[in-house]
Image (cartoon, helix red, strand yellow):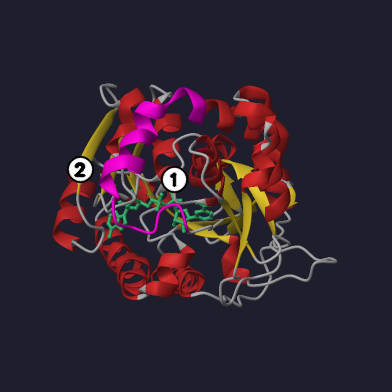
Amino acid sequence: MNFLVTGGAGFIGSAVCRHLCANPAYRVTNLDKLTYAGNLASLRPIENAHNYRFEQADICDERAVLDILRRDDIDIVMNLAAESHVDRSIDGPGTFIETNIVGTYRLLNTTLEYWRGLPEDRKTRFRFHHISTDEVFGDLPFDGGMFVEETPYAPSSPYSASKAASDHLVRAWHETYGLPVVLSNCSNNYGPYHFPEKLIPLVILNALDEKPLPVYGAGANVRDWLFVEDHARALELVATKGQAGESYNVGGNSERTNLSVVETICDLLDLRRPRAGGKRYRDLISFVTDRPGHDRRYAIDASKISRDLGWSPKENFDSGLARTVDWFLDNKWWWGPIREHRYAGERLGQSPVE
Ligand code: NAD
């Protein structure tokens, strides 16, 4: 089975490529534009694998994508290419519209042209899998409710609005043109190779540097956290076993306030890398002005993917976070250059996103 993974040099896409390449029956082409968020170092474990290849390309480039689809005889497209950082979408929404909406539109068009040329038996088995977020559903009250697949869309940020628009386009290409699509909407991912501007790696690395640990507002916002390797397994199932036209919610069953996430990281670091003079990492926590449109709570009901595809997360939040902290402690070769060189001059270190 031949996969085209777009955005495969990003956080989740690279986990998907590493996961798929472990199966010798799969061949994986990773198509990525290599924006600031793309990092080929995240593919180091598989860069020489016989069943992996990388192509630097833009999903908006229809000619290049069509050539790759045909050359590599693709059976499944998994679309993870996106602008993904909520704070960046507030500062500059243009690239989010360009990649997340126009890019998805162009990728759908190209894939449709390729799919129409396939023999009938392969047409039925083909899948266009669009990876999306629970943020398209908007905001939940603190005291109840969960997102199900039928929850109406109500995005709050330019990022989530652009993802919502792309989800609608994907469904329309199924309803209108018959393209066999599947969608998945998942909660906040965390784990190894997470770009250091996102909350969990930012807090780990700022703590190690004795820098403030920024928390929006009172840190009361609640997110559900999903270990990235559990997500990669879910995505393989959705792409290979999902019903065409269906969407699947993926969650970690691990709701936490942002403050409790930061405090848990501090406590893990106290044990693994104690600060000098008996000081606690929690003393570095610094509360900063909340961001506009900050949704209170996201919570995912993942019973459909569990019931229909037999998926459940292997990691709970405590075990997954411990693995993540240990990975960052052991892998400075990966994050050191990002913190020190590639993003000098950016707001890195002050941007407490989750
Ligand atoms: P990321 O920002 O780490 O990676 C995105 C990748 O896409 C990068 O490698 C980048 O170079 C590439 N890319 C950007 N524009 C491109 C273009 N025009 N053409 C080709 N490649 C391009 O993102 P991520 O966290 O890995 O998220 C992947 C997907 O999962 C996104 O669609 C995101 O909306 C969704 N998602 C992420 C999370 C999360 O917690 N990270 C949660 C839910 C859903």
- As drawn, 151 above or below 231: below
The amino acid at mark 2 is Glu
The amino acid at mark 1 is Pro
**Percent from the top left, x then y, of residue 65?**
21, 54
| Residue neighbourhood size for the residue with mark 2, other residues' Cα within 10 Å, grouped as few (<14), some (14–19), many (≥20) | some
Span colored in magenta: 328-350
Q: Residue at x 67, y 34 (%)?
A: 279
- As drawn, 205 above or below 105: above
**Percent from the top left, x then y, of residue 20?**
43, 32
Can you tell which mark lies on residue 55? 2
Q: Residue at x 56, y 26 (%)?
A: 326
Q: Quadrant of residue 94?
A: bottom left
Q: Quadrant of residue 272?
A: top right
How far apart are labels 2 and 1 at the CA level? 24 Å
| Element assignment for label 2 | strand
Q: Quadrant of residue 257?
A: bottom right
Q: Residue at x 48, y 65 (%)?
A: 86
**Percent from the top left, x then y, of residue 201?**
51, 42
| Element assignment for label 1 | loop
Q: Earlier in the sequence, mark 2 or mark 1?
A: 2
Left or right: where 159 falls relative to 8: right
**Quadrant in the picture for the N terminus:** top left
- As drawn, 100 above or below 81: below
Q: Main secondary structure of the magenta part?
A: helix
Number of numbered discs on residues = 2
| Residue neighbourhood size for the residue with mark 1, other residues' Cα within 10 Å, grouped as few (<14), some (14–19), many (≥20) | many
Residue pointed to by mark 1:
196
Q: Find out whether residue 353 is within the magenta segment.
A: no
